[in-house]
Amino acid sequence: MINRIPFCFGLLFAAFCFATNGNMAGDGTADNPWQVADYEDLKAVGVDSYSMNGHYVLVADIDASASRGEKSETDSTQGFQPIGMAYYGTPQSSFGGVFDGANHTISHLYSMSKEGRSTAMFLGIDSTGVVKNLKMEDCFFSAEGVWAAASVAVGNSGLIENIKFVRDTVIGTSNTGGVVGVNEEGTIQNIDFNGVVRGINDRIYIGGVVGSNSGVNSVIRNVKLHADMVTNYYGRYLGAIAGINEGLIVSAEAKGILEHGVRFLGGVTGSNLGTIDSCISHVSVVSLNENAGGLAGYNSGTIKNSSVEADSVISHFGVAGFVSTNDSTGVIENCFAKTKVMADSSAGFVVYNAGVIKNSHAEGSVAADTSSEGSGYNVSGFVVYNVGSVLNSYSESKVGGLLNVGGFVVYNVGAISNSYSKSDVDGVSIVGGFAGRNSGKIDNCYATGILNKGNPGGGGEFFGGFVATNDSNGIITNSYATGEVRGQVHSGGFAAVNEGKIQNCYATGDVHAYAWFGGFVARNQGRILYSYATGNLGKLETFSRALNAGGFVGVNDGYIENAYATGDVISEYTPGGFVSNNEGIIKNVFATGDVSGRVEPGGFASINDRDIENAFFTGKSFVMEGIEELIVPSCFVSRNSGSVKNAFYNEDDCDFGSDSTVSGVAAADMNKPSLYKDWTDFDKNWVLNDTMPFPLLAFAVGKSIDSIEVETPTKVVKPNLVVIKGTDGLKLYGTRQNLRATITLSRSGLTHIKVYNLKGRLQKIVPLGIMGEGTHHVELNDTVESRGVVVMVLEQNGRALSKSLLR
């Protein structure tokens, strides 16, 4: 007995039969299948005595051109009536036998449905049904204003394999696929599709192979696809392989164009809740809004061993080279994207990550959409917003935007480790070689790209070779930056602004800016430990002067210990070999670079208003040529109103004049141990022997530091998207034809309602988009199309939140 597969094929009406001239040889058994020799035989499959459970085999190529002139006797539809239409709305509407094409071709099969039913060659394929070894060429299927359309079957719960499609066209409203409309617990494998798949009207769940790969046991395997998928208007859940995937897609390769969707577009799937493995997308994606990606628009499942190698992924907002949103249950591993990405809030790999990304990378280029006023923001080489975990990943994309630009990440509040960026980064404000802003944990990472290589004039503020701003909760350890930094105000070889903690890090790039800049950090308001800078500092070519430059830090309002700078500092106003302006605590530090300036220049510091302890300056200091008079120069600190303890400078090479605060020492005497007898914990923090011209910090020569601070690993807090405690997340009101719902949420996220029958079979998915915290009122008219009891489940970001019964 054939079980009815749980698909809604359109409006139900009384069963009827079509006359047929088919007269097939055989008896329908596996040993003696019915022989389909011509178009009349094809129309007879499953009709009258030709069982829907029987075995059929093609014995010749079939030219079905005659189907274009046919018209239904009961409605205005034209062309071929799907196999199973004679039993439409009954258990017999699904095919449970075997249809073997024997490598023959069916060509010019035409079917256009306009009133109340879906269309394909088969209405449905049951769990025992098999369609195989077939070629379909120049076939056309179109269903307007109804549920689904496809080439082979509207719905499949059986096996479809070894099918080749040449220049086929499929057009439908929803659940439309080049091969199958809805694949529920079925298998589709060894497919080669070349044609057009187009969504019209509502345009939801449109896929080059299937519209919906529904159910965890649904499989799509070994697929090659070259399809143009251009919707007439806006579309949702569009994918070159599947519009939405809840099962398994493995070993699929897609080429073509996916265009004009408004949300959830992807080169493989619009939304993945299942598993994608070993897939490749060459599909160019053009979206009109957010959640579009080179491989998937949204992921809350697993994607592994897959890649995007496409020309471009383009939208106005919120797209990425690989996946737009990787939600809290999403895992991406061993994947890469190589494409051109253009949009505001765009990334080379992922826009929003709340899950896990590992062993992945991005190449190509990422640029903001600067076509409209106020745009050009949130651009990164790898991920825009990370609240999850990223490890063992890297970006080699060229990155350009205006505001909030990062070589690897724009904003991190999660954990990133063992990752790097080689991206050159251009931007106007809040620009970082690795991160734009960090409020989480970054460990063992590096950036080698140049900041504003393509924008030598700089502009704006907050430029960091590694991070633009490290917030008060931000922790960065064991990381470095090597690229040159070009900025205007607040520019640092490693960070523009630090309010958190930076430990065991370094910067080697030169820094060119206008004001408030440093070889390591422009402004420090947090803690910096065991770090150094070697880059040189100077003004931008487009400015006539520079001010507030420090070899290590421009302005210090925080705490710095065990640090040094070796770069030269050239600044007309207030330069310092280590710091321009100190209003915090600095201890166990030194600077060796040359310093030149004219207004308040200092060999070690220009201005000190707080505490400097255990510090020295070994470089040269000399007067810069210029029209201004030399104002208050000093070999160590120009203007001091704070405390300087255990400090000295190189008196042999200072042209600024002596310093009343500290003593000068001849360069040849800087290695005498007696100079350091009053320094607290000298042996712990410093190393000095006869071969050294002056002491070096112990961490810099590889000596273990017993007192080095070890941070407890940051616990990544992933969004716990649940219904507000003590309330019903989903309440239903009204009738099936006039159904309303009240939805109450505690947090925002991608939300939808799934409709199940009492056997647990998924009937329909109602996408609600991104819904925020609070109470929402939603119209659900015509959501439930069949009578009887159904279960409606509210889900957000892949997690079931609440369910209600509708009787």
Image: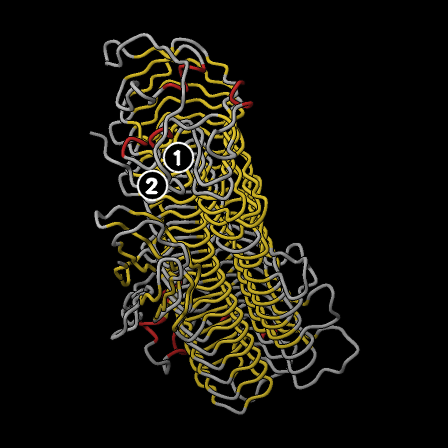
Q: Which residue is drawn at 38% across and 60% down?
A: 751
The type of residue carrying mark 2 is Phe
- State yes or no: discs 2 and 1 in contact (Cβ < 8 Å): yes
Question: Where residue 148 appears, x then y in whole percent?
Answer: 43, 39
Residue 336 appears in which quarter of the rendering? top left
The N terminus lies in which quarter of the figure?
A: top left
Instruction: From the viewer's perspective, tell me whether residue 109 is left or right of residue 184.
Output: right
Q: What residue did someone put label 2 on?
A: 7
Q: Distance between the residues labelled 2 and 1?
A: 8 Å
The type of residue carrying mark 1 is Val
Q: Is mark 2 on a helix, strand or loop?
A: loop
The earlier-in-sequence mark between 2 and 1 is: 2
The C terminus lies in which quarter of the figure?
A: bottom left
Question: Where residue 574 appears, x then y in whole percent?
Answer: 63, 79
Q: What residue did someone put label 1 on?
A: 154
Q: Which of 234 and 770 is in front in this view?
A: 234
In this view, 361 is above or below 218:
below
Q: What element carries label 1?
A: strand
In this view, 388 is above or below 295:
below
Residue 681 appears in which quarter of the rendering? bottom left
